Amino acid sequence: MVGKAVSALLIGYLLGAIHPAYIFAKCLKGIDLRAKGTGKVGTSNLRAQVDSLWPVVITALYDTGKGVLSLKIAQVLGIPLPLCYLGGVSAIVGHIFPFYLRFKGGEGAATASGLALASLIGLWLKLPPSIGIADLAALAGFAGLSSWAVGRGDVIAVFLVPALAALILCFIFALALEAVIRHRVFPYLPEDVRWWRVLLRPAGFSFPLLGLWVSKQTLLSLIGSVLALFVLVDLIRLSSGKVQSFFFKRLASSFKVYKEKERSRLSSMTLFLLGCFVTFLLFPLKVAFLAVTFLIFGDLTAKVFGFVGGRTRFFAKTLQGTLGYLGICSLASYLIFVQGLAPFWLGFVGGAAASFVEALPFHVDDNLSVPLLSGTVMALAQALMG
């Protein structure tokens, strides 16, 4: 068994290390992709360097399928399924670090996406046809809309994998974030953006998760305690000129905690905790879980999509950011549905409502309006469906 497992890893790595993009670029143009464009040996860079479409299509198909091919070969060798996936992961490693190219290959997003989609197909085949087809169509539509709106192929990987394993999902998201940095988005962001606060927002997902394990009263006590601490800090800051000066002048020179608009109001962090507290207080667990999840991940995704490709205004935000919000809400709804926590249709309705509310030019902070209004829509929909 050990020998078969080692063989699967080696075969996967070698299949992954084969780069049609590098071969086509050398044969057709006489160039080394590592020294051109993005420096990546993959479909995107090949497309920018050659005029013909057919080498790009062949490259895309092989790069997407090499992980699945490695998985299938491992299965033929008679290895247990969990170990077979290591063959697929080995193909991703080979794609990124090909030995004959001095370990400088592609990004691995296509290979990881293909491997994840193969797993999805197995899951969908086990579902009733009507549910599987409807879910696939809806998610594919959101993926297409989001990627079209943003106009960057690097970000599409996030929406091609609605139910992949957490490790592969994090890997692909890291690639998308790296692409944002590589395209020099951050130097042109508004100065008042606190990215450490934006990226810290997913930590708030611990509240919905805790709601699955503890009673509602315990959860509200926990959120309420953290909320009380943040409110206290805000009240001290707003009532004392010295404290306010410390945060906005002395501390801001090295580490900016608050946005300029928070100089005379409660901070967004406090309002986020207040939104979570009120949502779990008013709504059933399933509805509150979805509403808070949409708030957490939708806000982060809308900011990234809006800054990367925000070109078309949509109410108070951009169409691209709103579609990104809708896409991540759909992804979250499907993952929650797969885990049996809430029906997909409920998440779809709530996600659409949250995306629309987030784009409206309300004077109410999104941390309050998004979870409360989307939660209300889901609660009404649930009541109508009986």
Image (cartoon, rainbow, N blue to C red):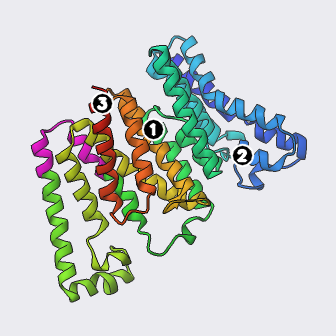
Query: Going by the picture, which residue comes out furthest to the front?
Result: 384
Find out whether the residues at labels 3 and 2 contact each other: C-beta distance under 8 Å: no
Q: Is residue 127 above or below residue 31?
A: above
Question: Looking at the picture, how far across and down is residue 145, in whole percent?
Answer: 59, 43
Residue type, mark 1 in image: Leu
Question: Looking at the picture, how far across and down is residue 302, in whole percent?
Answer: 48, 55
Considering the numbered disc 3 on the image, is that residue within a helix, a strand or a loop? helix
Q: Residue at x 21, y 42 (%)?
A: 283
| Disc 3/disc 2 C-alpha distance (Å) | 47 Å
**What number is the disc on residue 331?**
1
Residue for badge 2: 44
Q: Residue at x 17, y 53 (%)?
A: 223
Q: Is residue 122 left or right of residue 104?
A: left
Verify whether residue 211 appears in magenta.
yes
Considering the numbered disc 1 on the image, is that residue within a helix, a strand or a loop? helix
Q: Is residue 61 left or right of residue 180?
A: right
Residue for badge 3: 384
Is residue 123 at all visible to an observer of this figure?
no
Verify whether residue 261 appears in magenta.
no
Question: Looking at the picture, how far across and down is residue 252, in whole percent?
Answer: 36, 81
Q: Which label lies toward us, 1 or 3? A: 3
Is residue 326 at all visible to an observer of this figure?
yes
Q: Quadrant of residue 311?
A: bottom right
The residue lying toward the viewer, choosing from 307 and 110, is: 307
Q: Which label lies toward us, 2 or 1? A: 1
| Disc 1/disc 3 C-alpha distance (Å) | 24 Å
Q: Residue at x 57, y 11 (%)?
A: 76
The residue lying toward the viewer, choosing from 193 and 310, is: 310
The magenta span reads: 204-221
Quadrant occupied by the C terminus: top left
